[in-house]
Amino acid sequence: MGNFIRLMKYVARYWYLFALGLGLIVIYRYLMVVPGLATRRVLNALTPPFDPDEVFRILPRAALTIIGASILSSVVNFVQMYLQSYVSQKTIYNLRNDLFNALIQKSFSFYDRSRVGDIVSRVTSDVDRVRRMTSFWINQMISIVAGFVIWIGVLLSINPWMTILCLLPAPFVFLITNRYRKLSRPIFAEQRRVFAEMNIFLQQNIVGTRVVRIFGQEKREKKRFTGINRRYFDLQLEMAKIRALYPGLNTLIMGVVTALIYWLGGRLIIVTHGTPMEFKWGDLMIFVQGMSSLMAPLRFLSFIVGSYTEAMAAAARIFEILDTEPEVKDKPDAVPLPPVKGEVVFENVTFGYDPDRPVLKNINLRVRPGETVAILGPTGSGKSTLLYLIPRFYDVTSGRILIDGYDIRDVKLKSLREQIGIALQDIYIFSATIRENIAYGKPDATMEEIVAAAKAAQIHDFIMSLPDGYDTVVGERGITLSGGQKQRITIARTLLKDPRILIFDDTTSFVDTETEYKIQKALEALLKGRTAFIVTQRLSAIKNADKIVVLKDGEIVECGTHEELLAKDGIYATIYRTQFAPREEILARRMGGGE
Amino acid sequence: MGWHGGPPPGRGPGWRHDRFTRREEEKLERKVSDIVLLRRLMTYLAPYKRRVIALTSLMIGAAIMSLVTPLMTKIVLDRFIPAGIEAGKTSVLNIWLLAMVALLLAQFGLSYGRQYLIAWVGNKTIYQLREEMVSQIQEMSIRYFAEGETGRIMSRVTNDAEQLSYFLGSGLVSVVSDTIAVVGALLLMFTLSLQLTLLSFAVIPVMFLVPFFMRRRIRKAWRQTRVKIAGMTSVLQETVSGMKVVQAFTRESRDMETFNAVNLETVRARLRATLMAGLFRIGVGLAQVVGTVALLWYSAIQIVNGTVTFGTFVAFQTLLMNFFRPLMTIANFYNDFQSAMAGAERVFELLDTEREVEEAPEGELVELGEVRGEIVYDHVTFGYDPRTPVLRDINLVIRPKEKVALVGPTGAGKTTMINLLCRFYDPQEGSITLDGYDLRKISLRSLRKQMGIVLQDPFLFQGTIKENIKYGRPEATDEEVIEAAKAVNAHEFIMKLPQGYETVVREGATNLSVGQRQLITFARALLVDPKILILDEATSSVDPYTELIIQKGLERLLKDRTAIIIAHRLSTVRNADKIVVIDNGRIVEMGRHEELLEKGGLYTRLYMRQFRDLEEPEELTARQRGAGEPAQRPSMGRRPRGAGPGALRGKMMELRRLIKEREAEGHDVREFKELSRSIFAALRRGDVNSASRKLDEAIERLRNLSNKPQT
């Protein structure tokens, strides 16, 4: 109920339109009955033995009433529908904006936990479910109630026994529909699940076809598929049975009741024939019409009830996003970080995504302005995590990080991140032109700046070879770039931002040897005077760093320059030898080749 | 690899839109005629002939029933009630009621049976088609499995088949019954009242056709709305996927504006569509009310004149509905038919793809038992397109338990060598033998039983780690699984996982690192204990640390079997018994690591390239570059130094050393001194490629110089 009220608060901003819409529904419902009543008069006049004069006296007036009421009701309906749509659209517009605003402030940890598809579906499908409820549910309820009251009133004034007969199928229709919905829902859900399973099976067997064939598992896989396929077939049949049975039962019941109306009405006509209380043909026909008008919304009713539960579940998912506070946010008394020189200090920093399982343990590291720090270590040793702490994508569990002496938690996030350029490991290219992608962090950059950044990232020549140059659209809707090209655009994007502190998180893994070398050369000049953190798998890129940090299981195990670490003969030295020893061997061989 | 390819089962509006446009496009590309497709589809219905006949009769029955109900109404109004009034008793109505209820029950039965059979026939056919498609996928030539094709193949099995199911189940048969219903209603209307029928046809087109045509414009408005929603979804999807970048570049407020704009657009589009729909309703309402009033008016006159009975008037209204509703379905049939045929064409296209190699005929087929593992390529020539051979005249003998490494630039034909050995293809010329048997004579099953394969992209199936290790030998015991895992160094990390061997490999195996996944595939291969093991770039996607770990597992895996190894990282192949260097489809060098290094040919150059500070020889770079990527002119006018050009510096030093040495030996080295200066100049220009080549040349010549007798 809390969620319902909260949703209604969104609607309440447009309460006057909403209320007007509800009022119009009642009017519309009444106008809908008028043509039936006019027809009744004509048909009553036609009940034999009829008086032709009276028929022709009634006919024009009835015709005018019918036409007038229909026009009026169409217009009222139109206005009402539009209002309803307007209110619900405005409501979800606000809701979506609020959601997006909440999303954009969420911390990295939120995105680590959630799946993109899930988030997107909350903003699209769940919001749509809520829309259906706010626009459909309430209006439909009012409409059904108003329709019921008006029709019952009209019918009662004609004949109470016939009215009771008309209402007779109501509980059955409602119960049958409800049962239908309840039975079909789990089957439908199961169908979707099996269908998804079929998709996964296909994907795996297509992508992994060589493995399947070499391991000779075709028969087993086929059997597995037949299982899924069979299950899907059975579910479809089960669904078909339910689909054929329940709506069919409703049709049957309503058919039988219609027959009963003719039967009872016929009896009334016969019995009252010639009496002053005569039951006429028009009376009979309006009960036929009235019964179906009363029953039709009942078929919806069950689905409306269902949509309420569905919408409340959707609302809960939406509010969950709105309500979780971002973990990293500005302190109330945060100050803007003044332009920095670029000193970065880690003081006893411990961090874990899950506080019980620290990923980084007691990190102490002092980086002077302008130094280049290379970080290496095995997968999962905490390299990326270490870097992500600097722009405060996560907050440390204990200890602190200082930039130019400021604890980064005491400064405004925006001012902090604006001074840090980070090329992330997840390369992300937006569906836009290359120019926009490079200028992503600095939308007002000049073309010269963009080209300079692209040149430094060794992507300029490639861009120029494209038909539209920098205006070529890339990403989902444009041309597909290779991993290396994407990485180079990412680098250009980071360089263009021109920050004092630069972070490169394994950003050249897809770039070929030669290009990487060139990028490194370009970076050498650009890094001058900036503080830089570099994670890479390639030792040769590391050798020149002012400081090499070797991480293992979240701890700094070695730290020093290339020469210092070689002298230490630890992990770094081992790795260095495994990668470079063979080359030394070649050279040695070459040198000795003459003998 | 396209792990996330294919349409998701949860269908976002964007996906629906994409699918729609795709359908539209493919509809235009139809190649096979409808008749041919329809005939072939009919063969799928043939096994269920009796059910199809039953279904057709049920539908015809239902169509006829739909005519009887209005007649019954007419009878009660025109016959029974007046008769009752005349006789002054009500009991006559009881008979009618009983008949009516019986009729309704029959109708219920018919409709139930019809719907059930529709679902049965449609889904059974699709069940069958899907079974065939999956068998085909398992046996079709692997050339169809290019990257990016996954989604397309999948959608044939899922979406296209689904669409056919509706068509085969209801679409096709209902056309027959709908036609009967329409003709029947028309005949009945004429019999009941010629005047009312004629009036109806004057008025009714307004009532039904106006909305029928107006609906198109409404549809367009709704389509617009869907496009806008799809647009909003894609903005959202993109921002959420790239949120880390958004935040890293502090773009929050700008992106909020973008989203706000698309959000507003969807609202506007939707309201516009609502407006259109509202106007449409008014139009329909007016048309209908005019029709209803005209019919009422005219009927009243006819009733007064006695030419039409009251019952006919009531029955007529139902009949009109029974006439037009199926008519609309028939009108839409062509569209449904077209898209079903397009789907059928794609389904059959899949079923008709070329299969991989054929088994030898019964008498010649060899079932291999335990093999020694001797492989011989004898003058093998092969091309995926026979006109452009990828392998030319390959001759190679691999002895049992030999470790052979295949090395060469991308596109040289290494993977093709393996594809032939696994018999995914047959060579066009020459033959490959295993233990002396021509591969073409060996049954595929017994051939592949001998092989284990480890691919670059460690491919795991959905399921637990244990199930994955057991993949090739489902009957293996837990002990054997653990033993295999221990042997390849996987046991330790598996035990560290929360559920150990029962840990479920997540979609895309995101809960395991590449190295861990690779170790699992090692264990999987080891458990099968194949006589021949193929490693296709098995260590390329692994970082140097992980490689150190994997290396041990690899050694264990390779023990005691014939192994063929493709590797980019040449450090992996150094210990091979034989290194085969392939370039451009030919074997250009062969020998042990040391021998090949002596030679100083392609292998040496490839080997040198491993080290990032070495430049690639120009010929290689040219081939490696994509067509779209022009030669990059180095923009740095600085002398390379430090780690990058370390090897070049090494070479320079060696050059100088050699020059001094030869000078000391009394050779004329002026030319080399000159060369050394020009190389230095080239390096300053940043022209590292040519510098490197000249260096190699110079060093080579200086070395040769020392072998020549002094003059």
Image: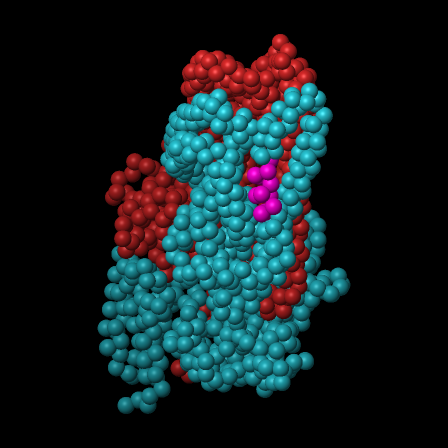
Chain colours: A red, B cyan
Q: Is residue B358 magenta?
A: no
Which residue, as the protein is rendered here, is positioned at the far top?
A276
Residue B118 lies, in percent from the top left, at: 60, 49
- Judged left or right of residue B294, residue A496 is left
The one of B463 and A26 positioned closer to us in this rendering: A26
Query: Residue A499, relative to residue A233: is it above or below?
Result: above
Q: Is residue B66 magenta?
A: yes
Q: Quadrant of the C terminus of chain B?
A: bottom left
- Res A495 seen here: no
- Judged left or right of residue B391, residue B522 is right
The one of A344 and A456 positioned closer to us in this rendering: A456
- The residue that appears at 53% across and 30% down in the rendered structure is B312
Residue A538 lies, in percent from the top left, at: 46, 57
Residue A576 lies, in percent from the top left, at: 50, 61
Query: Residue B26, relative to residue A493: is it above or below?
Result: below
Residue B364 lies, in percent from the top left, at: 61, 85
The one of A272 and A316 positioned closer to us in this rendering: A272
Which residue, as the protein is rendered here, is positioned at the far front?
B86
Q: Count the labels in the image.
A: 0
- The residue that appears at 25% across and 82% down in the rendered structure is B668
Query: Residue B161, relative to residue B75: is it above or below?
Result: below
- Res B448 seen here: yes
By secondary structure, the bulk of the magenta-drawn segment is best described as helix
- The residue that appears at 70% across and 50% down in the rendered structure is B499
Q: Which residues are magenta?
A: B59-69
User: Residue B254 appears in which quarter of the rendering?
Assistant: top left
- The residue that appears at 42% across and 60% down in the rendered structure is B33
The one of A199 and B33 positioned closer to us in this rendering: B33
